Structure formats: C-alpha cells, structure tokens
Image: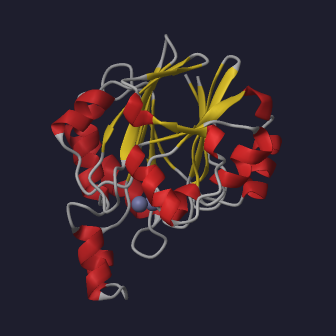
Amino acid sequence: MKFYSLSSSSQGNCYYLESGDSALLIDAGIAAKKIEATLAQSAANPAKLKGILLTHEHIDHVRSVGTLAKKYHLPIFATEGTWQGLEQMNCSVPFQLRRSLDELDNLTLGRFNISWQATVHDCLNPIFFSINDGEKKFGLITDTGELNSQMTEMLYDSDILIAEANHDVNMLKSGSYPFRVKQRILSSHGHLSNEDCAQGLLAMIGSHTKHIMLAHLSQHNNTPLLAYKTVKQTLEQNCTYEDYTLWVARAEARSSILEV
Ligand SMILES: [Zn+2]
Ligand SMILES: [Zn+2]
C-alpha cells in the first residue's frame, strides 16, 4: 500500500492511495492540472484510479472534482448531504458518475474495502474513511471538531494514519482572524488543534502503525514545525508504541511517499 498527499491545508486537499492495480483519490480540492502534474511526476497511472472519495463539500475538498470526473470518467463517492451541498454549488459532476454512500454499508473498489463514519464539522454530512486492501489498513480523518471514541476505534491500529492537526490554539486565539471565525474553528464543529490531534492519536496508534501524517494545517494559525513538535512531545510522553514515523503533509506540494 502506498500513500501520499498532493496538497493539504485549509486552502486545498487531495490525497492518493494505491495498492497493486488499484488507486483512489480522496478529495480533489486543488486545480485539476496540479493533480494531473503531481500524479505524472509520481509515476502514477491515472488508469489505475477507481474513483474519488469525498469527505465533504467544502471548496478546499471538491474544487476540481467535476473536471476530473468528466475527463477520466471517474465515479465520485459522497454522502447524500455532500451531494446536496455540491448541488447548491452548481456541481459539475455528471449524474451518471454520482454515487451515494448512503445507499451502501461499505464499498469495494478494486482491492480496496472502504468504510466511513461521520465527522463533526459545519457542513451537511461530513465523513472520514478507513480503507483496507486485505493486508494493510489506512485511515484518514480531517475537518472534524471532535475526535470521539467511535472514530478512534474505527481508525485504531491503522498501518498508515492521516490525522488533522489544524491549528495551535494560542496562535489562533492571538491571530488576526475575526472573532466569529475563531469561534467556528475552535468549536466542536470546527477543526482539530495540534493537541486534540495528539490526544486522538494516542487512542489510534497500535502495534501495526508505521506512518502517521499530520494534515490540513492552517497556514495562518500553525506551522509544520510547531505541529510536529507538539504532537511528537505528547506521543513520546504517553504512547507505548514507538515503531512509527511522524510526518507532516505539505501545504502546496506533494508529501513524502509512505509505503507499508
Ligand atoms: Zn478543509
Ligand atoms: Zn471543511
């Protein structure tokens, strides 16, 4: 199983997962041309793509989904709530390529067995994903104000874990964002702080966990180094497992390629 982030921040998110002859994109929140160029540079074959999974309808997750769906004839998987949200944004995904996750209990795409569950975020029906290829387990959770035990149980002991570390609470509180926006980000329907992320990871890391990547960092209220240091310190002090590498996704460039 192979994973990388093409871009990850409050400005745009897109992630690539591959196993054997199967590949997926999770979210498509950056320009289609940039996604195509990054896949080409990374020797990814678009013919392997089985579809795009969407976490929710915020623009930083769906910007080019219509373009990619049409160009590569890719089915797009999202909840009914996300489809409603996309509809209000004049969604350009052709009807024949729209798939509703509400009609399914789980989903098999190529080698991937895909499960999902609700996150807590200020949109219609946001979700996160746990994906298994029969040998390895992958989990990705971003855009949630809360990381509860149901979520951590589903993601527990993933070989690769991608988790949101959106902001440093002090940077956010003392920063220039309007009060209302600060309240939104800090609320239970907003985003996870570095410390929230670290606490959640303590409940998710298991003996199989090899790679953890911090994702969806705010470019105003966080820095990669601060996120890394905060999470690393909490994990070093409290986590019994040590056999993993901690990474930080880059805001506007491809991350390292993680393989298990
Ligand atoms: Zn987002
Ligand atoms: Zn969002």
Residue at x-position 66% and y-position 57%:
64
Q: Which residue is drawn at 29% across and 40% down?
A: 201
Furthest toward the top, the residue is: 134
Image side of residue 76 versus residue 88, left or right = right
Query: Which residue is at 43% across, 51% downward?
Result: 82
Q: How many labels does the image show?
A: 0
Q: Toward which corner of the image does residue 244 lie, by quadrant?
A: top left
Q: Nearer the viewer, residue 58 or 17?
A: 58
Percent across and percent down for residue 254 are 66, 50
From this viewpoint, which residue is outermost toward the left?
A: 149
* Colour convention: secondary structure
Question: Taking the image as four quarters, which one is ligand 2 found in?
Answer: bottom left
188 to the left or right of 231: left
| Image quarter hosting the C terminus | top right
Q: Is residue 186 above or below residue 192?
A: below
Q: Nearer the viewer, residue 11 or 101?
A: 101
Mark yes or no: residue 182 visible.
Answer: yes
Please tell me in which quadrant of the rendered image residue 154 appears: top left
Residue 74, image x, y percentages: 69, 37
Q: Which residue is drawn at 82% across and 42% down?
A: 40
Of residue 66 and residue 248, the one placed in the foreground of this image is: 66
- Give the left or right position of residue 47, taking residue 109 as reference: right
Residue 256 makes an appearance in the image: no
Q: Which residue lies furthest to the front in this view?
A: 95
Percent from the top left, x then y, of residue 132? 46, 20
Left or right relative to 181: residue 153: left
